[in-house]
């Protein structure tokens, strides 16, 4: 059996209503049980308990289940924590498990371990490979979505500052006979402080909810009067958990934070797409296009009543106008006014009536699938958690490095922590190799005698 | 020569070749060393220095495995310095300026004294091949020598072309002929060939330098040494180096000559090292610098010639003269040998196994610049590994190469065979992810016991090593059992603050400001062996970092140690993208760990590979049952 590290993941889709299960597997399971619930639950017996944070205060209550190796799903020690399913609480539980020494599992990693430990039949090899492949692709897409906009800009900015700092520190170590002593350069200390501050700020913003709870963005797009606003009201009206309500900078872009079965969503209503109009409307359309471009998911809303004769060509026209880099779903709205007997569309669609509420549940279900909240899948919410986890590890490394540098002035310990920080950030922005670093040194300084 | 059959044949007598030949003969294999010229055994073709950052780590590892480089550097070293003294033990390094003649003598003596080793002066023209196995070599005179293993260490001699200004001629090094017939022969084999470039500065007659104006840089006292066996007594007389700088006049002279620079007119297409640019390159690329540093390195005790390190150039001779004479202290300088650039063939190192055996011809090993590296130390390290593995293969034992967590040698070889190289590869400490563990002070503790098992370590070295290890154990035990009470004025005065509770000496040593020497003297304990107390101090102060890296190493080893069969068909691995399977096919990694280090191979791809291997293994077991 492979001696592995300990991994953690949500085993159930995020949803407010039901139960959420966090699964932990690996050698640290008993330590984690001790830290999380203050003891080791009896094997294979569901134990009702509180889940504690680092300070010993309960985060949630629920059941803990311990499966000892080899009699478990993965063949390793496994702990299952069943909590109340809300994404924020579940995320706190996962964070706590990570704090206790586990790392976030890669997509499909539980099944992979089960397979490698002979818990899954060899004939399933292809199926497991498929699962890993598709789950990784989905996670990669979610990660890209999480990296849009302001968050991405800040992360890349932080990474760039880190690389600059490392360029100084590593040049000081590998090229001590150049005429500048890079370690004595005040830029090293000030750069380190600035970097710590930047990561802390970004982390705080995220933890306070501005980034994490904002969730995925879903844009309603379509012609004026297609029923977008009524659909928006259907969502916000049936779901009372409105977090904030912010009017857009123009009257034409409105966004609201809602929970879709506990999953945080930013729902954005846009100006109806059409050519011409007054300058304000043209500006509104321009902004709508921008929102659509940045959306995680687009609902293309069609007015059935207005397109009884040309439904197909109208849908085609809309698809042509709307930038298609995000997943989308066509919503055939106003089914209370008219309903086609057969629909012959080449894309996925749902039939709804914002007025009567018919089809809204189907729409919600499709929406959740579409943005990746399905079993085994990985949505933007998890992707964002991964990113924050990486930032946290980067921050810890920097703080240690700062202390070590202050204590001993030994550049090598600072360099080591900067390297670890880079490894953590690299999980977000992609690998940065030692050769990349050397390249930066040679292009920044005239090195070599 | 009557003997025709050997167990190992080494071609080339540079830094790689000598370590290879010494290692295989020390391991008991009948070895033949073929060199173009016995007078150039152990020749330092570039600057007269051994060691430096990242490089002394290699030298000490070679020494810990019984190699010759460190001892030769101690016997020939006329100026020693410790670099990065205050940046921490892991990045601390030693550099020796060596007397070229003394260095060659030390190497030649070691070769001549080595049992099982024959030296013969002959240029090799051809390889003897049977099927996909090497059988021996044929020399210029038509003599054939046979062996199941051949180590090629031919440096820059394969298709070497020397450039000075717009003049170019064939050569392996200034004054030596290239190995063109061998180069042509190797080009017929399926190896992928590339071109690299390196260069040297003009040498100067020291009599014509005005040192009175120049900054003098003496060696360090106490004087560091290279070899773990060194007592410091083998060092010859010590001399100083000097420092001068280029100026705007120098840069003007260079700019005026650029139209006759082979580098800038496109004559040279080999890739040069980014960290060792020629002076014309520096002037062109860093226009904001009005001055560049030059280290004046003495060539030896019995010569006035010096090596002005920092002005490597392939500009025409008249420009070289202008630029040299524009430099402070060099106004009247006489150039004894013009600088030049050399282009040479190298072979894609990703075609090698970890043993440095080539993938296309069993029994043929490559080491040194032929693999795209630069530097004596990098060459010697590869020579040692190739020599060891040639001997292991003769003895029908499994191959050995240190991994990335064991030695810089492991980092070097893994980088070469996994990532390949596009420029001359030089070692830097930043290449080692386990830098805090891979220190020059503990190379013996990392490698000597392994070397002993391989048959590389003689009884004297083994005894010294064992005594040191025992000393480290005894001293840390002693320090852990010595307790200091609060109120102990001697210690509290030294620490500058009162003790809050009882501490043992190891606890106190953990504090960043406390040094082992003063602690031992306060406690009245003898400090007989600086090597021993140093290890206790580093182990103690860095315990947290070292154990964290060790945990990482253990984890990676258990996950990544799994071997990949040579005949694996990556197109059959479910789920792998074409791009990843193409990369894996090119590198042919030997382990999962090596596969994971190939750029573009994602964790998901590694998972897919693991699943494939598991299934493959099970079905193979089923078939054989």
Image: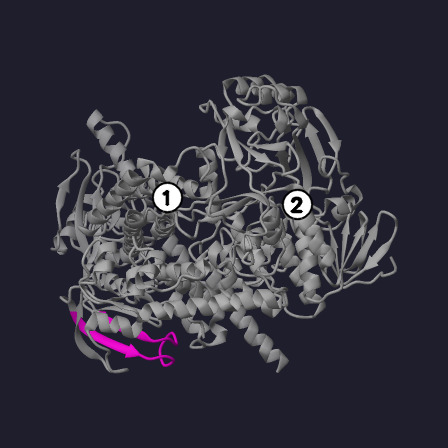
Give the answer, above or below, for where B349 lies relative to B526. above
Q: CA distance from mark 2 to mark 1?
A: 69 Å
Does mark 1 fall on the same chain as mark 2?
no
Q: Position of residue B319 (x, y in %)?
A: 63, 20
Q: Quadrant of residue A180?
A: top left
Name the quarter where the N terminus of chain A is drawn: bottom left
Colour setup of the view = one colour
Q: Is residue B369 above or below residue B549?
A: above
Q: Position of residue B481 (x, y in %)?
A: 31, 71
Callout 1: helix, strand or loop? loop
Report the residue at 22% width, 25% height from top.
Answer: A279
In depth, the one of B327 and A167 nearer the eye is B327
Image coordinates of residue A131 in percent, x first then y, are 42, 64
Can residue B193 be spotted in the picture? no
In the image, residue B101 lies in the stretch drawn in magenta? no
Residue placed under numbered mark 1 in the picture:
A325
Horizontal side of residue A442 vs A31, given as left or right: right
B519 lies left or right of A179 = left
Q: Which one is in front in this view, the residue at disc 2 or the one at disc 1?
A: 2
Which residue is pictured at 69% across the width and 53% down the height? B18
User: Is residue A30 shown above or below B592?
Assistant: below
Q: What segment is highlighted magenta in the picture?
A: A61-82
Q: Is residue A73 magenta?
A: yes
Point 51% across, 30% down: residue: B243
Letter of the chain that mark 1 sits on in the rendering: A
Q: Which mark is residue B462?
A: none
Label at residue B102: 2
Name the side, left or right, on which A344 lies relative to B451: left
User: In which chain is the residue bearing label 2?
Assistant: B
């Amino acid at each position: 059996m492979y001696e592995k590290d300990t991994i953690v993941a949500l085993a159930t889709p995020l949803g407010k209503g039901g139960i959420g299960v966090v699964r932990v597997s690996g050698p640290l399971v008993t330590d984690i049980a001790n830290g999380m619930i203050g003891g080791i639950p009896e094997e294979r017996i569901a134990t009702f308990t509180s889940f504690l944070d680092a300070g010993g205060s309960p985060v949630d209550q629920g059941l803990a289940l311990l499966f000892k190796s080899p009699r478990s799903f993965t063949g390793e020690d496994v702990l299952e924590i069943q909590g109340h399913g809300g994404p924020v609480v579940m995320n706190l539980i996962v964070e706590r498990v990570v704090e206790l020494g586990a790392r976030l599992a890669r997509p499909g990693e539980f099944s992979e371990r089960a397979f490698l430990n002979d818990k899954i039949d060899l004939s399933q090899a292809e199926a497991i490979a498929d699962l890993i492949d598709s789950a990784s692709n989905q996670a990669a897409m979610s990660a890209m979505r999480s990296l849009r906009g302001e968050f991405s800009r800040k992360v890349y900015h932080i990474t760039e500052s880190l690389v600059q700092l490392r360029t100084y520190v590593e040049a000081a170590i590998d090229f001590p006979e150049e005429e500048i002593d890079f370690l004595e350069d005040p830029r090293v200390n000030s750069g380190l402080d600035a970097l710590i501050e930047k990561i802390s700020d970004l982390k705080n913003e995220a933890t306070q909810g501005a980034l994490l709870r904002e969730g995925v963005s879903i844009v309603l797009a379509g012609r004026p009067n297609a029923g977008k606003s009524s659909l928006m009201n259907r969502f916000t009206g049936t779901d009372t958990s409105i977090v904030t309500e912010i009017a857009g900078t123009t009257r034409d872009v409105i966004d609201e934070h809602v929970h879709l079965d506990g999953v945080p969503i930013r729902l954005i209503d846009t100006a109806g797409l059409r050519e011409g109009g007054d300058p304000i409307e043209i500006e509104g359309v321009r902004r709508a296009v921008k929102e659509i471009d940045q959306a995680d998911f687009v609902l293309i809303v069609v007015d059935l009543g207005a397109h009884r004769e040309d439904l197909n060509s109208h849908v085609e026209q809309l698809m042509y106008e709307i930038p298609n880099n995000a997943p989308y779903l066509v919503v055939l709205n106003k089914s209370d006014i008219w309903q086609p007997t057969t629909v012959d569309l080449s894309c996925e669609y749902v039939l709804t009536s914002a007025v009567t509420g018919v089809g809204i549940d189907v729409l919600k279900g499709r929406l959740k699938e579409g943005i990746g909240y399905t079993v085994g899948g990985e949505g933007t919410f998890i992707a964002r958690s991964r990113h924050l986890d990486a930032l946290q590890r980067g921050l810890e490394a920097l703080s240690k490095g700062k202390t070590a540098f202050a204590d001993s002035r030994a550049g090598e310990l600072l360099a080591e922590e900067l390297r670890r920080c880079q490894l953590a950030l690299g999980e977000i922005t992609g690998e940065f190799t030692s050769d990349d670093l050397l390249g930066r040194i040679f292009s920044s300084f005239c090195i070599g005698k | 020569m009557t003997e025709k059959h050997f167990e190992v044949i080494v071609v080339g007598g540079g830094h790689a070749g000598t370590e290879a030949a010494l290692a295989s003969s020390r391991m008991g294999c009948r070895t033949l060393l073929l060199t173009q010229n016995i007078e150039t055994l152990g020749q330092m073709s570039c600057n007269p220095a051994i060691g430096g950052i990242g490089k002394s780590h290699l030298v000490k590892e070679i020494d810990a495995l019984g190699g010759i480089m460190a001892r030769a550097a101690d016997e020939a070293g006329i100026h020693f310095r410790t670099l990065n003294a205050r940046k921490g033990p892991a990045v601390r390094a030693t550099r020796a300026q060596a007397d070229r003649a003394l260095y060659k003598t030390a190497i030649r003596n070691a070769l001549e004294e080595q049992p099982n080793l024959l030296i013969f002066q002959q240029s090799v023209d051809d390889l003897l091949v049977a099927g996909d196995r090497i059988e021996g070599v044929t020399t210029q005179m038509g003599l054939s020598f046979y062996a199941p293993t051949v180590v090629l260490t031919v440096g820059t001699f394969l298709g070497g072309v020397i450039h000075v200004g717009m003049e170019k001629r064939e050569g392996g090094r200034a004054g030596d002929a290239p190995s063109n017939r061998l180069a042509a022969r190797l080009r017929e084999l399926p190896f992928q060939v590339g071109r690299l470039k390196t260069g040297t500065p003009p040498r100067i007659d020291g009599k014509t330098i005005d040192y009175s104006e120049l900054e003098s840089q003496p060696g360090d006292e106490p004087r560091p040494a290279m070899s773990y066996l060194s007592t410091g007594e083998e060092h010859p007389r010590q001399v100083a180096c000097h420092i001068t700088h280029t100026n705007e006049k120098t840069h003007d002279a260079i700019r005026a000559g650029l139209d006759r620079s082979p580098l800038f007119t496109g004559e040279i297409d080999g890739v040069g090292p980014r960290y060792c640019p020629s002076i014309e390159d520096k002037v062109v690329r860093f226009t904001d610098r009005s001055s560049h540093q030059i280290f004046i390195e003495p060539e030896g005790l019995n010569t006035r010639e010096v090596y002005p390190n920092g002005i490597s150039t392939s500009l025409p001779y008249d420009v070289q003269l202008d630029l040299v004479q524009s430099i402070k202290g060099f106004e009247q300088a006489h150039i004894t040998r013009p600088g030049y650039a050399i282009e040479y063939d190298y072979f894609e190192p990703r075609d090698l196994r970890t043993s440095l055996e080539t993938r296309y011809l069993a029994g043929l090993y490559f080491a040194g610049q032929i693999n795209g590296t630069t530097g004596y130390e990098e060459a010697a390290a590869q020579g040692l590994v190739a020599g060891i593995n040639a001997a292991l293969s003769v003895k029908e034992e499994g191959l050995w190469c240190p991994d990335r967590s064991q030695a810089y040698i492991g980092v070097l070889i893994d980088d070469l065979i996994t990532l390949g190289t596009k420029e001359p590869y030089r070692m830097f400490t930043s290449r080692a992810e386990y830098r805090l563990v891979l220190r020059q002070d503990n190379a013996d503790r990392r490698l000597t016991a392994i070397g002993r098992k391989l048959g590389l370590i003689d009884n004297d070295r083994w005894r010294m090593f064992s005594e040191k290890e025992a000393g480290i154990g005894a001293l840390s035990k002693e320090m852990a059992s010595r307790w200091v009470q609060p109120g102990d004025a001697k210690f509290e005065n030294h620490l500058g603050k009162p003790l809050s509770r009882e501490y043992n000496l190891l606890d106190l040593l953990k504090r960043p400001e406390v040094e082992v020497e003063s602690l031992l003297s306060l406690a009245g304990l003898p400090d007989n062996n600086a090597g021993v107390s140093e290890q206790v101090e580093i182990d103690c102060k860095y315990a947290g970092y070292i154990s964290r890296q060790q945990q990482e190493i253990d984890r990676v080893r258990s996950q990544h140690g799994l071997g990949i069969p040579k005949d694996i068909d990556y197109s059959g691995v479910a789920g792998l993208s074409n791009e990843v399977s193409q990369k894996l096919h090119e590198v042919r990694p030997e382990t999962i760990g090596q596969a994971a280090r190939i750029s573009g191979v994602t964790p998901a791809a590694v998972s897919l590979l693991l699943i494939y291997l598991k299934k493959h293994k099970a079905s193979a077991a089923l078939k054989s049952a």
